[in-house]
Amino acid sequence: MPQILKPQIMALNFKEIFTASMILFAVIDIVGSIPIIIDLRKKVGHIQSEKAAIVAAILMVLFLFIGKEILNLIGIDVNSFAVAGSFILFFIALEMILGIQLYKDDAPETAAVVPLAFPLIAGAGTMTSLLSLRSEYAVENIIVAIFVNIIFVYFVLKSSGKIERILGKQGINVIRKIFGVILLAIAVKLFTANIQGLFK
């Protein structure tokens, strides 16, 4: 009798989802970005949380599938992309630590896409991490991990005003300095981890 082929059902691996979610959570670091989000809201008056979350999710999913091909197409390797991202993180960290303003917009209407969705949420560190995760985990598990993080990001963006009231101005300043140093360390680590690959 001919063997009947059964369609394969895509099974989710919760261990992979959890691990990938934790890695993305650490790289996105939306909690550490709360001071930046509050500053952006003061600059533009309003942050479109839904738009920022949706755009970031689309960018991350697209990059998961075609990121490496896009970089190769325009002649940029992953190391160069990560080094460029480290500079962006470096300057954002300087803003947080020194209390200076480097990001300027002559007539900002919204911060939903730049610099919130990119590069703050779906930045070079996140994109590089997605490429690394794809080599180890199933794509469907990474996609679930992306949306788990995006949901959390959305709630943080939506609640930034309440968080500011709870922490107060002094609390925000303290957190801003602390996470500025952490972000600076991440930028340095991202730079040193990828700069060697450019000279190989």
Image: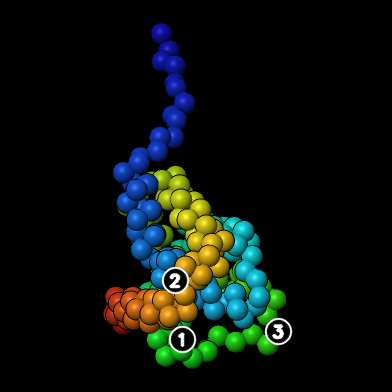
Residue 1 visible in this rendered orientation of the protein: yes
Q: Position of residue 196 (x, y in %)?
A: 29, 80
Q: Nearer the viewer, residue 67 or 186?
A: 186
Q: Is residue 48 above or below residue 44?
A: above
Residue 107 - label:
3
Three-letter amino acid code of the residue under disc 1: Glu
What residue is shown at x 31% (from left), y 79% (from top)? 185
Pointer 3 local density, CA inside 10 Å: few below 14, some 14–19, many at least 20 = few
Q: Nearer the viewer, residue 189 or 139?
A: 189
Relative placement, left or right, of 69 versus 136 is right
Residue 167 - label:
2
Which of the two discs, 3 and 2, sits closer to the camera? Answer: 2
Three-letter amino acid code of the residue under disc 3: Ala
Three-letter amino acid code of the residue under disc 2: Leu
Q: Position of residue 50 (x, y in %)?
A: 62, 58
Q: Which sits earlier in the primary sequence, circle 3 or circle 2?
A: 3
CA–CA distance in space, label 2 to label 1: 20 Å
Residue 95 - label:
1
Q: Which sits earlier in the primary sequence, circle 2 or circle 1?
A: 1
What residue is shown at x 42% (from left), y 90% (from top)? 98
Give the quadrant of the N terminus.
top left
Q: Position of residue 5 (x, y in %)?
A: 44, 21
What residue is shown at x 66% (from left), y 75% (from top)? 45
Residue 135 - label:
none
The image quarter in which residue 167 lies: bottom left
